[in-house]
Image (cartoon, grey):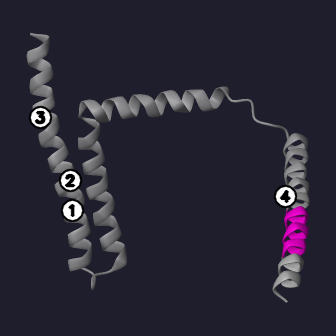
Amino acid sequence: MNSKVTSEGSRFDALKWAIVVLLVAAGVVGNSIYAEQSLFYRVVALLVLALVAGFLALQTEKGKSFFALFKESKAEIRKVVWPTRQETLQTTAIVVVAVLVIGLLLWGLDSLLSWLVSGVIG
């Protein structure tokens, strides 16, 4: 019985995704067809189409799993220990100094090789 429900759900999911694609295509085509209309009305229409398409996409299995992943990632972001202002400034300073040192080394190497090649070529 469970496999029957899954197969029916996936069949309807394909139909839902097709409708989502059609809604997005309608938004793209409609925006170009009604280009002479006010930008406000076109943006409102696109937002409504996007909301309907998003709502329909969230009704599918992949949409539900995406939403669950989104909620879990928000919970993980709350667990992150962000660096302090001092740590950020120190790390940034280290990166800037390292980039400058490497840049100067590459400039020196380039100048040396350029001088050597111009000496050989004449």
Q: Which residue is mark 4?
A: 99
Where is residue 72 drawn, in percent x and y? 50, 27
Q: Which residue is mark 1?
A: 25
Q: Is residue 64 within the magenta segment?
A: no
Task: Describe the element under mark 2 as helix, strand or loop.
Answer: helix
Q: Which residue is mark 2?
A: 21
Q: Is residue 110 within the magenta segment?
A: yes
Quadrant location of residue 109?
bottom right
Q: Mark 2 against mark 4, which lies toward the viewer? A: 4
Task: Find the magenta span and give its range.
Answer: 103-113
Amino acid at dot 2:
Val
Q: Which residue is mark 3?
A: 12
Label 3–label 1 contact, CB within 8 A: no
Q: Mark 4 against mark 1, which lies toward the viewer? A: 4
Q: Nearer the viewer, residue 30 or 39?
A: 30
Q: Is residue 46 above or below residue 17?
A: below
Give the distance between the C-alpha atoms of the residues marked 4 and 1, in whole angstroms: 46 Å
Q: Residue at x 30, y 36 (%)?
A: 63
Task: Point out the tag, 3 or 4, that comes first from the N-terminus.
Answer: 3
Give the distance between the C-alpha atoms of the residues marked 3 and 2, in whole angstroms: 14 Å
Quadrant of the drawing holding the C terminus: bottom right
